[in-house]
Amino acid sequence: VAPGAAVLRLQEVKQVFGGLTALEAVTFDLKHGEVLGLMGPNGAGKSTLLNAISGVTNATSGTIEFFGERTERLESSAVSTRGIARTFQTVRLFWDMTVLENLLVGGHSRLAGFVPKFLSPFPFVRKSERFTVEEAEEVLAFVDAWECRDRRASSLDAYQQRKVEIARALMTRPRVLLLDEPAAGLNESETRDLSTLIARIREHGIDVILIEHDMDLLMGVSDRIVVLDHGVIIADGTPAEIRKNPAVLEAYLGS
Ligand code: ADP
Ligand code: MG
């Protein structure tokens, strides 16, 4: 994939919950080589958007294309198999398991949606069904949590939990990683460390959508920022453009 090519393409994505329209005709591309920041006041629809992309929920209408294939009706396991991984706003781990076990279990979701390579338009669909301990240790070293490998997930501090959750997502060898407020609950130095981790993930050719309330982190690590307010994109531009955008300022002041 060439840098700048559209990896993920959302067109007119709408998400209705009962009487509430959480997303209204959301249209944007994630381009290869990009960290795309997603910001907006509480309740703007940011998590809802990641849910729609990752197949946790299916959009009410609109289309989502991943490398040209429509994914908006797929289940989350099938989306994961195609190469989109995510973390959640509240960390999700198996708390009674060790860190290594958490990473090895993550592989089963990959297996569930496994597509034989010859049937798939995606050359990068993994052929092996099960993750190895060596792979898990390699990914843990990458996120700098290797020393936690035999610890119970519940005994980890907030940043270690977050890194293990990111490691679990990386085990699936994703092409795209969706991060929902990964710096929530972290102190300043952990947040700075997280931003270097996100940069290293991008250097590995993984494209990132990052939801973040910490503006320094978001502005520092994002190439482009999309701003949502009440389910509508009110701005889309570079961090410098977003910083001085009056509509963005107003959305935050008015919320
Ligand atoms: P954000 O992540 O930007 O803070 P959310 O995407 O979590 O916002 O929520 C957007 C709106 O959609 C909120 O009003 C929220 O209450 C509503 N919402 C989100 N998920 C559901 C759901 N599963 N059922 C009903 N309403 C939901
Ligand atoms: Mg949210």
Image (cartoon, grey):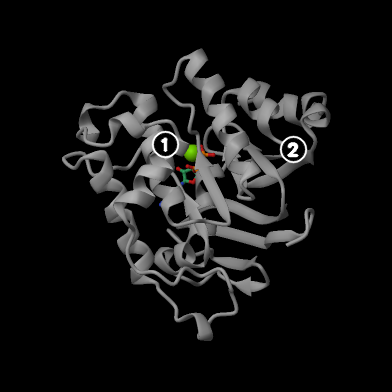
Q: Please give the label number shown on residue 141.
A: 1
Instruction: Residue at 63% x, 43% y: name it.
Output: 202
Q: What type is the residue that disc 1 sits on? A: Ala
Q: Please give the label number shown on residue 37.
A: none
Q: Residues within 10 Å of mark 2 (few under 14, many from 20)?
A: some
Camera-near label (1 vs 2) is: 1
User: Residue 230 lies in what quarter of the image?
Assistant: top right
Q: Residue furthest front?
A: 134
Where residue 113 appears, as percent x and y from the top left, is: 39, 72
User: Residue 11 lies in what quarter of the image?
Assistant: bottom right
Q: Please give the label number shown on residue 223.
A: 2
Q: Is residue 155 left or right of residue 236?
A: left
Against 210, residue 196 (above or below) is above
Element under label 2? loop
Q: What type is the residue that disc 2 sits on? A: Asp
Where residue 76 appears, as percent x and y from the top left, is: 42, 63
Instruction: Residue at 48% x, 53% y: name it.
Output: 85
Q: Is residue 90 visible?
A: no
| Gap in angstroms between the C-alphas marked 1 and 2 | 26 Å
Label 1 CB sits under 8 Å from any ligand 2 atom: no
Q: Quadrant of the N terminus?
A: bottom right
Instruction: Residue at 78% x, 30% y: name it.
Output: 242
Against 200, residue 55 (above or below) is below
